[in-house]
Amino acid sequence: MATTNDPRMAGRTETTRGRAAGAGATSIRRMAAVGVVGAAATVVDAIVVRAVVQPGTDVSDKMFSYPFTSGAFVVASLVNALLHALVLVGVVAFVRGGAAGTGRAARVGAGLVLGGLGLLTAAELASIAVRGDRIAGAGVTAVILCFSVATVLLAAGSIVLAVTSRRAGRWAGWRRNTPLGVAVTVFALFSAPSPDLLPIGVALWSLALVGLCAATYTDPTPAAPAPSAARRGAAPEVRLP
């Protein structure tokens, strides 16, 4: 009978843990790839709207569907909702990977960002019902409020995750700055002075999300940095001449 101290059992346990960790990393990498696709497609979508759709539209900017016609707005809203959902999957991968740490602050930040993306997706779908209304309509005001609350949640959560990621210190090099990039560019969604410039803000924010999801894909389960000798209380090494 094998005992708990049997080296064969210890080896099997380590092998099982290694396989579980490998499977977890593979799952996170797949989810991060979904996020990369969603964020990159959002960048392309925003550029097309700004460079092609807006200059060629004859829809009044007083209409909620601007710059789309009613039919085109339905398609655009469904596409946007899908892209937000894909990005949400990528952010879940980032959270699961642990680059932002495992403390309460990281969980709160993740909850805010995921809640913001979820509300953003819902607002895209709800906007279809008021696509033919003018901006001043009551229904439009409610939908715009949903978009605004979602953006506030995204901004607050992104700031928290940027701070916790920096403190966790699990990423180095270019990956280290990707959470901060998302936190900075999300404010481009607030600062757009007109609907014509909103796609630019969306493109910048989405580009930062591409970087975050790419960082997660290339390093899905970053390890916590080893504590220094001083922090461990180890005695300093003495070298004899």
Image (cartoon, helix red, strand yellow):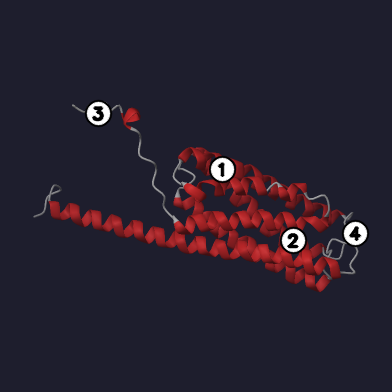
Q: In this view, does 4 lie to the left or right of 94?
A: left
Distance from disc 3 to disc 1, alpha carbons, whole Å, reads 36 Å
Distance from disc 4 to disc 2, alpha carbons, whole Å, reads 19 Å
* Location of residue 88 in the rendering, given as x and y in whole percent from the top left corner: 58, 57
Tell me, for residue 162, which label it has, or none.
Answer: 1
The residue singled out by tag 3 in the image is 237
Q: Is residue 64 left or right of residue 172?
A: right
The residue singled out by tag 2 in the image is 126
* Mark nearer the viewer, 2 or 3: 3
Which image quarter holds the N terminus?
A: bottom left
Position of residue 43 relative to residue 177, above or below, is: below
Q: Earlier in the sequence, mark 3 or mark 1?
A: 1
Q: Earlier in the sequence, mark 2 or mark 1?
A: 2
Q: Which amino acid does label 2 sit on?
A: Ala
- Residue at left offset 69%, top offset 64%: 80
Q: Check if mark 1's residue and mark 4's residue have beta carbons within 8 Å.
A: no
* Location of residue 183 in the rendering, given as x and y in whole percent from the top left corner: 62, 45
Tell me, for residue 62, which label it has, or none.
Answer: 4
* The one of 60 and 146 positioned closer to us in this rendering: 60
The quarter of the picture where residue 13 lies is bottom left
Badge 3: few (under 14), some or many (20 or more) residues near its Cα, within 10 Å? few
Q: Which of marks 4 and 2 is nearer the N terminus?
A: 4
SS for tag 2?
helix
The number of discs equals 4
Q: Check if mark 2's residue and mark 3's residue have beta carbons within 8 Å.
A: no
- Residue at left offset 49%, top offset 55%: 216
Distance from disc 2 to disc 1, alpha carbons, whole Å, reads 30 Å
Q: Earlier in the sequence, mark 4 or mark 3?
A: 4
